[in-house]
Amino acid sequence: MPANKKKHDAFARLADWLENGAQPLDEEIGESLADEAYEEENAAEKTIPSVEVKKQTPKKKKRQERHRRKRRDALTVGAYADAWWYRVTAFIVCVSLVGLLLYGVVRMPLFGNADTLADSEVASFYVTHTLEETGAVNIVTGIILDYRGFDTLGESHVLFVAVSSVLLLLSIRGEKDEQERLLESDREQRTEPDHDLVLQGGARLLLPLVLIFGIYIILNGHLSPGGGFSGGAVLGAGLILYQNAFGYDRIGKFFTYRTFRAVSVSALLFYALAKGYHFLTGANHIPGGIPEGTAGAILSGGLLLPLNIAVGCVVTCTMYALYTMFRRGAF
Amino acid sequence: MEILNVILLAVIVACAVAVSLTRGLLSAVIVFMIQGLAMSVVWVLLQAPDLAITEAAVGTGISTVLMLAALKKIQSVQRKEERRDAGKQKEA
């Protein structure tokens, strides 16, 4: 069955890549250290010729054996997917997860019921008080950046931590030799879009619109639907389109790893400090000294506009960084 | 509006089923993208434009691009010449 074989191939390649690409560094170092110690031991004995010793090191043989076994296991992973118990277990797990979810949904308070306090009090409070308390015409932004400001701070940090983890994991070098690495980078280069006329023309037409729309969503977040996260995602998608159409050289002129680090760290720091100051003064009933402006104007809503810009910067950087890390393994 | 809603929801369900039944990884990603697009139109109809913007940018754009990058990493998406070369190597 050709389709099935193809599937197994993909599985095996994935397993191989995982194994070779993500070999833990400590193990490698530990093994090479053990090897050195072994050789020194033998050198001290001086009775056996060193060349022969190197060839028939039992440890090395054992390691080769282990590596071969690991490889064989990786190749047969796909075969398990056809076993009947695998399917039955997968079915049971899926059904029980769906059941758990449905059980939770059934136990939720009835929608629109007068007895459920949750949906009668909080929602109406937000609708009546948001404009006057936060100065935001767009109630959603007023809630996520003011009432639940710490939530959004945590979300921004989750994005930042995700990129940091990817950076950390991909910077571990596997035991691939030099030639293999060269081959891979060569293949990467050949599959890059090379001055694709359709792509470049489309990008020239679309990019200004996409970028301006993203900036508009961020700056207008407290007045119209949208905000830092949506605008940042649009801008990040625009950057990815730019990279695909014009290549790494062009985007490297204004967006590098240094830019990413500087922008996202300072935006997060600004968010944390501004929100901390806001909460501190608000909780102690001290006037914060932040001008509120007239509701509905672009410069209004106090801290909402700067906070939106900070969140937008973080999200833009994260989206592009995640993409470029997975594509190239580096900036 | 009612008819449009029904059609869009049907498209979403059909796409969700199709994703899990499709054998080709590339087609599965494309069908998943269509599902995200239909979802973002549903958000507009439900009067949640901010969610629609996010869904269109993240669900349709960025997650698709990330999945395509992953497919390329496991060499599931190849150029024509490369596929021919790989076939030759297998024969040899």
Image (tube, coloured by chain):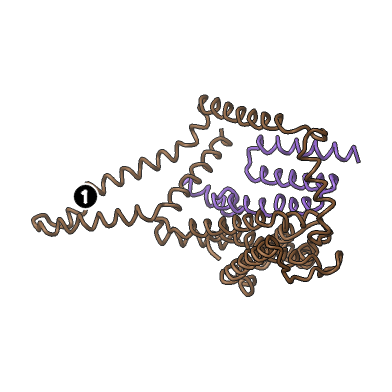
Give the side of residue A154 with respect to residue B16, left or right.
left
Depth order, front residue of A274/B69: A274
Residue B66 point in image, percent of width and height: 62, 53
Query: Which residue is farthest right?
Result: B1
Query: Which residue is farthest bottom?
Result: A253
User: How many labels were placed on the picture?
Assistant: 1
Depth order, front residue of B30/A285: A285
Residue A37 point in image, percent of width and height: 21, 57
From this viewpoint, is residue A214 visible?
yes
Query: What residue do we see at 52% from left, 32% from top?
Result: A81
Query: What residue do we see at 38% from left, 42% from top?
Result: A70
- The chain coloured purple in the image: B
Residue B12 higher or lower than A278, as above or below: above
Q: Amino acid at mark 1?
A: Thr
- Quadrant where the image shows the N terminus of chain A: top right
Label 1 Cα neighbours within 10 Å, binned few <14 / some 14-19 / many ≥20: few
Give the side of residue A285 with respect to residue A36, left or right.
right
Q: Which residue is mark 1?
A: A57
- Disc 1 chain ID: A
Residue A177 point in image, percent of width and height: 39, 59
Residue B29 point in image, percent of width and height: 67, 45
Colour chain A appears in: brown
Give the side of residue A273 with respect to residue A134, left or right.
left
Residue A263 higher or lower than B89, as above or below: below
Give the side of residue A142 with respect to residue B64, left or right.
right
Residue A323 higher or lower than A14, as above or below: below
| Location of residue B6 (image quadrant) | top right
- Quadrant where the image shows the C terminus of chain A: bottom right
Query: What residue do we see at 79% from left, 38% from top?
Result: B11
Query: SS class of the residue under badge 1?
Result: loop
Query: Which residue is farthest left?
Result: A47
